[in-house]
Amino acid sequence: MSIPFTIPTEPQALIDLARNGNRAALARLISKIEHRNQDTEKLVELLYPLTGNAQIWGITGPPGAGKSTTVDRLLTHLRAKGKKVAVVAVDPSSPFSGGAILGDRIRMQQHSGDSGVYIRSLGTHGRHGGLSHSTKEVVLALDAAKFDIILVETAGVGQTELDILKLAHTVMVILVPESGDSIQMMKAGLMEIADVFVLNKADRPEADKLMRELTMMVGLGAHDENSWMIPVCRAEANRDIGILEMLVEVENHQQYLKKSGKLEKKTKEFLKEEMVDILTAELRSSLDSILKTDGGRELLEKLYLKEVAPYQAAKLLMGNS
Amino acid sequence: MSIPFTIPTEPQALIDLARNGNRAALARLISKIEHRNQDTEKLVELLYPLTGNAQIWGITGPPGAGKSTTVDRLLTHLRAKGKKVAVVAVDPSSPFSGGAILGDRIRMQQHSGDSGVYIRSLGTHGRHGGLSHSTKEVVLALDAAKFDIILVETAGVGQTELDILKLAHTVMVILVPESGDSIQMMKAGLMEIADVFVLNKADRPEADKLMRELTMMVGLGAHDENSWMIPVCRAEANRDIGILEMLVEVENHQQYLKKSGKLEKKTKEFLKEEMVDILTAELRSSLDSILKTDGGRELLEKLYLKEVAPYQAAKLLMGNS
């Protein structure tokens, strides 16, 4: 590893080093993307042609479902197969989620000496959808840095957290027997996001009931022979039970995505969202500039005084630029 | 109350009826805003000049903190003072939050015969920041319909839920002794959103510890004599203890906002966000249209094949419109 003061700040040099396995360069690259400055666009433009080789997996579940134990076990098995794996833990810092992710990161330090594993937490810069945008671009950097699998982990506590997972090819949803009844889960659109269900802590007495409900729910969801039938895996992550079976199901799903053409469809949807994110960020920043001009301030004042209405003001403002 | 088939669909007639206290018209008006169609812009333009009289309060807290019992008690006291109150319960349907809000709505039906109370849940149309946008416009409708106080309630489980509260003048954060230690709350930016802390279930033995921590935290937060010093109220909502004291603190905060000029500042910030929301929605919809044209499809294909990069493609796409 090179010593810190040798890390270049020039985008191309930084990317070259990160692709050659330099961790300090990769860390700086990701920080630059996360903090967004004038280099971000340049970095993304340079990174993008180098991407497309990694599998992007998502993992979510309620607090206490055993997400990080599961990730920890997955890492061990994937490393045994020679895969390079990056973990991106996204923590939009819900004030009430208990901040478990930081503690989890500390636990995963058993992999910290392993050059085939990279673990990174993304923080609270995420106002106005920005966290979801940064996460996408960080994943591009990890893909370009030649990781085989990029695991994006969120605590499934709100809409922002689930939106972030839309970048993943395959999403694993970890549940535990106490996760509540299946009707509430259906209502909540979990079926829409899950590709693989994992019933963790499956040795508990109430596990069979949830297993039956999940299996029935999944059966109701699949409509024809070309649909993906969401598998339900039983696991006890803390005893390393069921993890290899999960990996088989994820691999099945990846095969399904390729054969059905859905990988291309998902990727295009992802690219469209990336463009929306880029344009929204530009919109917001040009709106900020306009509102600092005399004309902008005057218009905001008129809006405040109700001399114009919001839709009209918005149009006038953008015509003003 | 008029029978359903007499409700007009024409925007101005609908608004006039809603302002005259017709509940069915108000419900239809809100549904129209929530479901967003070609009338939405027209409705908002008509509603906006009629707004600005209501106080907008936000209320949040972790599941189980007693938010709806508190709201229920607040309603009773506010009605006793002759205030007309609307409650907007925003439920972005976190798959893991347990769907408590629906059950809460049922409990609040004790107010359902009272023409001075209106309770409405907003659902899951909220992709891509849309829920936050709709909530703002629903609040405009309730303000125009002459409610004195509009109480926006969210389960504080994620970033989306907290973003929604940015429309409120005064935000109450309800905590319970088991809400966890103050360091985690500080980290999570609760201080940034709270104007009044309420320690509910304050009769529990562990309450004193959290009370001390909150008081200390709040003391660290206020920097000069012009800052608002966040009060910490003790309450036992289920026994109606501490609710009137909460109301006094909310009233103090409203006075503070007016005197300090922060009400104007908050309102302008809110109007700016409304314009960003409007323009983002327009951007998204024009992007959708462009991507359906031959030129748009071709560009997405080029992006998919990595012949262009995302920032460049986004610019080309908007130049294309």
Image (cartoon, coloured by chain):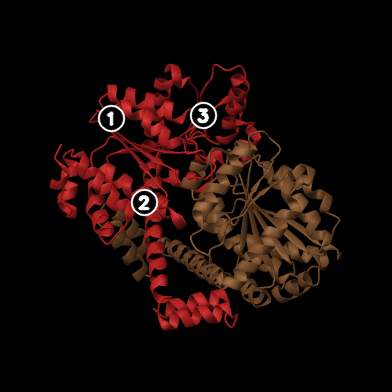
Chain colours: A red, B brown
The amino acid on which the numbered mark 2 sits, given as a three-letter code, is Ser
The dot on residue A112 is 1
Snapshot quadrant of residue B152: bottom right
Circle 2 Cα neighbour tier, 10 Å, few/some/many (<14 / 14–19 / ≥20): many
In percent of width and height, residue A22 lies at: 18, 39
* Residue A305 in view, yes or no: yes
The residues bearing labels 2 and 3 have C-alpha atoms spaced at a distance of: 26 Å
Judge by depth and name the residue closer to the eye, B145 or B183: B183
Give the x, y percent position of residue B77. Answer: 80, 56
- Of residues B258 and A28, which is closer to you in this image? B258
Dot 2: what SS? helix
The chain containing the residue under callout 3 comes to A
Would you place residue A12 above or below residue A315 in this image? Answer: above
Q: Toward the viewer: A145 or A64? A: A64
Mark 2, residue position: A134
Label 3, label 1: how far apart the Cα atoms are: 23 Å
Going by the numbered disc 3, the residue's amino acid type is: Ala
